[in-house]
Image (spheres, rainbow, N blue to C red):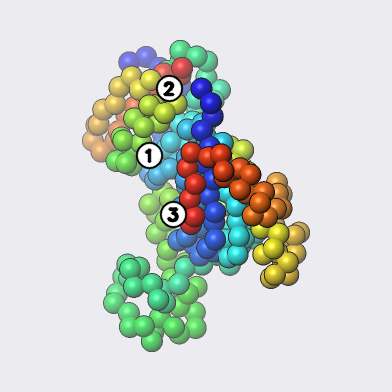
Amino acid sequence: MNFDKEFDASGLSCPLPILKTKKALADMASGQVLKMIATDCGSVKDMQAFADQTGNPLLSQSEEGGKYIFFMKKK
Amino acid sequence: MTTKKMAIIASKGTLDMAYPPFILASTAAALGYEVQIFFTFYGLQLLRKDLSDVKISPLANPAMPMPVPMPVFVQMLPGMESMATMMMKQKMKKKGVASLEELRSLCQEAEVKFIACQMTVDLFEFEKSDFIDGVEWGGAAMFMGFAGDTDVCLFV
């Protein structure tokens, strides 16, 4: 999937992946896509909850070798 | 859509009890909530510039996981509290848990409002200059002015 910005939250625990996602989205334009990588398995449900509550759609999430990869579109 | 609001009372000043208010406040702010934390009694210690006195005690804390079983009379020896705090901080760092300082500044960046209890300051004769910038001083009525209109209100 194409993306406009990427950041790696590997090794960080709750709530840092969410807080850093929020920060990363802050300076993106509407419609742009953020790729986020995390190792915290709690981030799977947290990212979905973040998407539901903020209205930024979570386009996809997948797991690869212990890493969780999220693509989120800025609303 | 109206902005959701959350109010938290932070009344404890130990390392373990310092995390929930800052974690919830920073997360709620990231979700778009307007957040205030009212720091009272021992919770006021969490607003000091220097957080090195915020510690965890193994004493009277039977749920605290210990690397080796430790009888209570050992836990009360001098230095045990500092050792437990050091070990806990090392573990948190290793597991990627944010430091209190980091979470606190993330809260401030996200415009979480910190209210410090004026009565506690007077009671313990604290120096206001020992506290971080951006703190508002107030009382119970001021807190209720905000808390009365919130979606989530917690006492920690």
Q: Residue furthest bottom?
A: B73
**Amino acid type for the residue under numbered disc 3:** Lys
Q: Which residue was labeled with disc 1?
A: A10
Q: B125 above or below B46?
A: below
Q: Which callout, 2 or 1, points to the residue nearer the camera?
A: 2
Tally the numbered discs.
3
Q: B8 above or below B72?
A: above
Could you give the CA–CA distance between mark 3 and mark 2, rounded to whole angstroms?
A: 32 Å
- Chain of the residue on which disc 1 is drawn: A
Local crowd at mark 1 within 10 Å, few (<14), some, or many (≥20)? some
Secondary element type, mark 1: loop
Quadrant of the rendered structure where residue B122 is?
bottom right
Residue at the (30%, 22%) spot, across then down: A60
The disc placed on residue A55 is 2
Q: Is residue B102 left or right of residue B127?
A: left
Could you give the CA–CA distance between mark 3 and mark 1, rounded to whole angstroms?
A: 13 Å
Quadrant of the rendered structure where residue B124 is?
bottom right
**Amino acid type for the residue under numbered disc 2:** Gly
The disc placed on residue B93 is 3
User: Taking the image as drawn, is residue B58 in sight?
Assistant: yes
Secondary element type, mark 3: helix
Could you give the CA–CA distance between mark 2 and mark 1, rounded to whole angstroms?
A: 24 Å
Camera-side residue: B21 or B153? B153
Mark earlier in primary sequence (2, 1): 1
